[in-house]
Image (cartoon, rainbow, N blue to C red):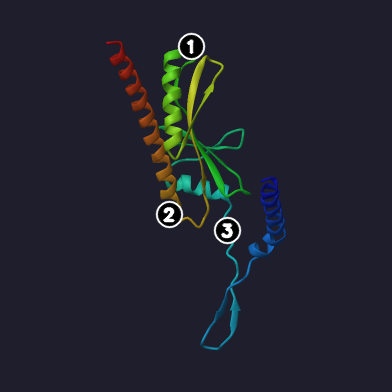
Amino acid sequence: MTWHIIGVIAFIVIYNIWRYYHEDDVCEYHPEVIDTSADNQVVESVMEETINTRQLAINAIERIGCEPQFTEEGRIQFEYQGVIFMMEAANDCMFVNLIWPWCHSFSKYDIDEFARVRQVVNEINLYDTVSLVYTISDSDDVALHIKKHFLFIDQIPQIDEYLRMIINNFFRTARKLELEIEKCRMQECDKQV
């Protein structure tokens, strides 16, 4: 049995070493060769210059009708349908974080509400495409934030509609959160009767 385990581990190690040394060969840029029939000249295509992620995010925010502002931490802040969102976008990364801070809050001393929210947050995080996180602030409140980490590149068609769809998913999740918390309250009332 131990020889089987040693064999599997050796295979994994050898495979990873092989992949490490051959990974650069796969990622190299190979230009397209175009043959024009008019004069039979071979022309190499040039790689398009792509826009960086941060500027792409700013442009998409402007195209959905919002005015981007910048926080001290370097985040992009914008208001969409009366709600303030924050986006973390870096030039050297193809992914961005979108956050709806303080979508729900309650007192940290309300044990029953904390139990309800914890149950609902766990359920939503299990089945939804966005993540709910809660933090405890200095003002004795527990704040819930909705967060999503997603790909944001120039090759996505209609990227402003893509961003709008993700933001609408935040609103759907906030509504689901409120409804599920209210359902838990109603179930507790039914149990007491």
Q: Residue 139 appears at what percent x and percent y?
A: 53, 15
Q: Given contact means CB atoms under 8 Å apart, are the residues at marks 3 and 1 in contact?
A: no
Q: Tell me the residue that label 2 is attached to.
A: 158
192 vs 75, nearest the viewer: 192
Q: Tell me the residue that label 1 is attached to.
A: 109
Residue at x 39% of width, y 28% of height: 177
Residue located farthest toward the front when viewing the structure as drawn: 1
For marks 1 and 2, give the CA distance.
45 Å
Residue at x 42% of width, y 40% of height: 167
Q: Please say whether residue 80 is visible from this viewpoint.
A: no
Residue at x 55% of width, y 19% of height: 137
**Which one is closest to the eye, mark 1 or mark 2?**
1
Q: Residue 181 appears at what percent x and percent y?
A: 37, 23
Please identify the quarter of the rendering in which residue 66 is found.
Answer: top left
Residue at x 57% of width, y 55% of height: 51
For marks 2 and 3, give the CA distance.
16 Å
Q: Earlier in the sequence, mark 3 or mark 1?
A: 3
Q: Given contact means CB atoms under 8 Å apart, are the residues at marks 1 and 2 in contact?
A: no
What amino acid is found at the position of numbered circle 2 in the picture? Gln
Please tell me how many numbered marks the rendered image carries: 3
What amino acid is found at the position of numbered circle 1 in the picture? Tyr
Q: Secondary structure at mark 2?
A: loop
The answer to whether residue 128 is above or below residue 37 is above
Q: Earlier in the sequence, mark 2 or mark 3?
A: 3
Please identify the quarter of the rendering in which residue 21 is found.
Answer: bottom right
49 vs 178, nearest the viewer: 178
Q: Tell me the residue that label 3 is attached to.
A: 50
Q: Residue 26 appears at what percent x and percent y?
A: 64, 64
Q: Please say whether residue 165 is visible from this viewpoint.
A: yes
Q: Secondary structure at mark 1?
A: loop
